[in-house]
Image: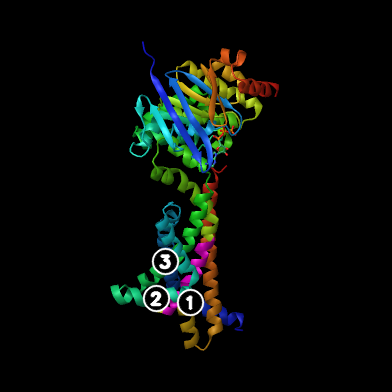
Amino acid sequence: MPSFSHFFSTLMETKGVFLEAMLLTLELTVVSILLGIVIGLIFALLKISNIKVLELISDIYVYLVRGTPLIVQIFILYFGISGIFLLPDFWAASLALAFHNGAYISEILRGAIQSVDKGQFEAGRSLGMTKALTLRRIILPQAFRRALPPLGNQFIISLKDSSLAAFISMNELFNVATTLGSNNFDEMTYLLIVAVYYLLLVALMTFVVNRTELKLAISDR
Amino acid sequence: METKEMIKINQLNKSFGDLHVLKNIDMTVYESDVVCLIGSSGSGKSTLLRCLNFLERKDNGQIIIEGKEVNPRTDDLNKIREKVGMVFQNFNLFPHKTVLENIIEAPIRVKGVEKEQAIMKAKQLLSKVGLEDKSDVYPSKLSGGQKQRVAIARALAMEPDIMLFDEPTSALDPELVGEVLTTMKALAEEGMTMVVVTHEMGFAKEVADWIVYMHDGKIIERGTPEQFFNNPKEERTREFLNATMLK
Ligand SMILES: Nc1ncnc2c1ncn2[C@@H]1O[C@H](COP(=O)(O)OP(=O)(O)OP(=O)(O)O)[C@@H](O)[C@H]1O
Ligand SMILES: [Mg+2]
């Protein structure tokens, strides 16, 4: 184990590199979460569409994502997509992570949508609102509220999962830590440092999620 | 002058799987009539009501709303639902919206009413149901009776020609039933066409123009409250009334 003073001085010396890496990690995470929400919402809606083919498509997607390791998905998308479309590395990584997140988010959203009382849907319909309008204005806002705690959890997982982008040479936190660690023959110090950055980011994310929850809770029953 | 037929049902049938819930129902509701649907649990009252605004699909038979037969496959049901308001046993207010937002949502989004105008109308309706001071409150802060009055105001905001009520007071504490019934009575006096599923025999006696008694998916008897309560023709009805009145 490194001494505390060594750990601390290294932490201070490398703060520039790590802050830059942290920014990239944050970007990867935010993009993969936002895209993941869009993908997740689409597949959640397919799943509840009552149309067999669409339900099946959604099931297959979730099964594929849950049934294979994330690193395999990243490699397949990275080599697959980049091979065809010449995608910048950042977008290959983001898409892979989003594709992965989307499956978990779709399950969370589906559960939340189905947990909204059926009477809410009927109330909307009985007022002459279309299915789509009822979904958008009545069901989804309530579902998102309920989904927020598990979504927050999923966001934290995505943040940590973004470290796998190191394997397709993104200079995010984990990559920087291992590179610096092996260059300086001092892996442990850099791993501890990167752990601190992840903990900071998770604390930040938890704070934002909790704040949002609190804000939305004001009107809750 | 001929009275307008607001709802006409011919030989309506509805099953859930093997369960035949509505059996050859015939019924006509004229303009400004208040029809109270009564009957024991499971007799099909809710299902009949829900068929009238197409929350439930009939299997066969005719449903004619304001003179026009509705074909659920080809007609725009949303347009018809605008004309047929519904009040539910469990209120079904939108919990994430304030009282005012609950009321103006559909007029704005469905009918395209200007926001200021929708708010003005909503405030009028709120004062009509005695809740003018609650417009910015969320439903969770209301009593059951207040919730149901908001639900009534919300349905009225679409300016329906017909109002359906499915046991509007059954989920309420006894001391809150009166305020909702009073609101409904006022609505009836204004000439609203109403179909009300209820167990409130006092209300039925006082406000209804017609009582329809259902049992096991069939309409067994119908008549004015006078005939129905004092002089029921059918043995079944007498049994039901005896059992209900004893409670
Ligand atoms: N969606 C459904 N699927 C299957 N069966 C149903 C459904 N809705 C109602 N039923 C059945 O149809 C029958 C009639 O139900 P309905 O709700 O119309 O009765 P009701 O007269 O309103 O009774 P209550 O006084 O208890 O409200 C019941 O046996 C009920 O279990
Ligand atoms: Mg019922």
Query: Does A110 appear above or below A135?
Result: below
In x, y percent, where is residue B158?
A: 40, 29
Q: Residue furthest left?
A: A85
Q: Can residue B38 be seen in this snapshot?
A: yes
Horizontal side, residue A161 vs residue A129: left or right: right
Q: Earlier in the sequence, mark 3 or mark 1?
A: 3
Amino acid type for the residue under numbered disc 2:
Ile
| Secondary structure found at label 1 | helix
Q: If the picture is divided into quarters, which one holds ligand 1? A: top right
* Residue topped by disc 1: A174
Q: Mark 2: few, some, or many residues within 10 Å (few <14, many ≥20)?
A: few
Label 1: chain?
A
* Residue topped by disc 2: A76
In the drawing, what numbered circle is on residue B239? none
* Residue topped by disc 3: A99
Disc 2 Cβ-to-ligand 1 distance below 8 Å: no
Pointer 3 with pointer 1, Cβ within 8 A? no
Amino acid type for the residue under numbered disc 3:
Phe
Pointer 1 with pointer 2, Cβ within 8 A? no
Label 2: chain?
A
For the residue pair B245 and A179, the one nearer the viewer reads as B245
**Mark 3 → mark 1, Cα distance in angstroms:** 21 Å
Disc 3 Cβ-to-ligand 1 distance below 8 Å: no
For the residue pair A108 and B84, the one nearer the viewer reads as B84
Amino acid type for the residue under numbered disc 1:
Phe
Residue at 40% across, 78% down = A168
The residues colored magenta run A153-167
Label 3: chain?
A
Asked if residue B190 lies in the magenta stretch, the reply is: no
In x, y percent, where is residue B149?
A: 53, 28
In x, y percent, where is residue A202?
A: 53, 65
Residue at 36% across, 70% down = A91
